[in-house]
Image (spheres, rainbow, N blue to C red):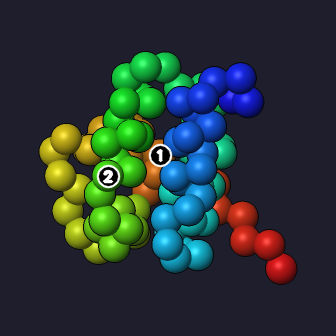
Amino acid sequence: MQDDPRLRRLHFRAWHRGTREADYMVGGFFDRYGAGWGEAEIAWFEELLEEQDVDIMAWGLGTALVPERFDGSLMDQFKKLDFISIPK
């Protein structure tokens, strides 16, 4: 990732959402899965980052319906929330 400016930019944007909760959800998701993504997955994530944090978090928590353009295997991974590690 360190050699790819696009992935560095995505990492920064994923971890600087504006709230700590969104940082852990979005940034943690990117850290866990982003290195293995191809072009389609990266494009999906770039589009996701344009959405409001409250919407992304609601989709991940299952409190709001996921728009069709984001629904699929990546959102299924995101909804597991098994990637969140909160430091003490």
Residue on which the image places disc 2: 50
Q: Nearer the viewer, residue 28 or 14?
A: 14
Q: Given the image, on which type of amino acid does mark 1 rest?
A: Gln
Number of residue marks: 2
Q: Residue at x 42, y 29 (%)?
A: 41
Q: Position of residue 30 (x, y in %)?
A: 57, 45
User: Do tag 2 and tag 1 residues touch (Cβ < 8 Å)?
Assistant: no
Q: Position of residue 23 (x, y in %)?
A: 56, 65
Q: Is residue 69 left or right of residue 11?
A: left
Q: Position of residue 37 (x, y in %)?
A: 53, 26
Task: Give the secondary structure at mark 1.
Answer: helix
Q: Given the image, on which type of amino acid does mark 2 rest?
A: Glu
Mark 1 residue crowding within 10 angstroms, few (<14) / some (14–19) / many (20+): some
Q: CA distance from mark 2 to mark 1?
A: 19 Å
Task: Inspect this view and state whether residue 59 appears.
Answer: no
Q: Is residue 69 left or right of residue 37?
A: left
Task: Inspect this view and state whether residue 46 appears.
Answer: yes
Q: Return the mark for residue 77.
A: 1
Task: Give the secondary structure at mark 2.
Answer: loop
Q: Position of residue 29 (x, y in %)?
A: 56, 50
Q: Find the residue positioned furthest to the left.
A: 68
Q: Residue at x 31, y 42 (%)?
A: 47
Q: Quadrant of the N terminus?
A: top right
Q: Residue at x 43, y 56 (%)?
A: 79
Tell me which label, 2 or 1, sits earlier in the chain. Answer: 2
Q: Nearer the viewer, mark 2 or mark 1?
A: 2
When the figure is inspected, residue 15 is found, relative to residue 8, above or below; the finding is: below
Q: Nearer the viewer, residue 61 or 54?
A: 54
Q: Nearer the viewer, residue 38 or 75?
A: 38
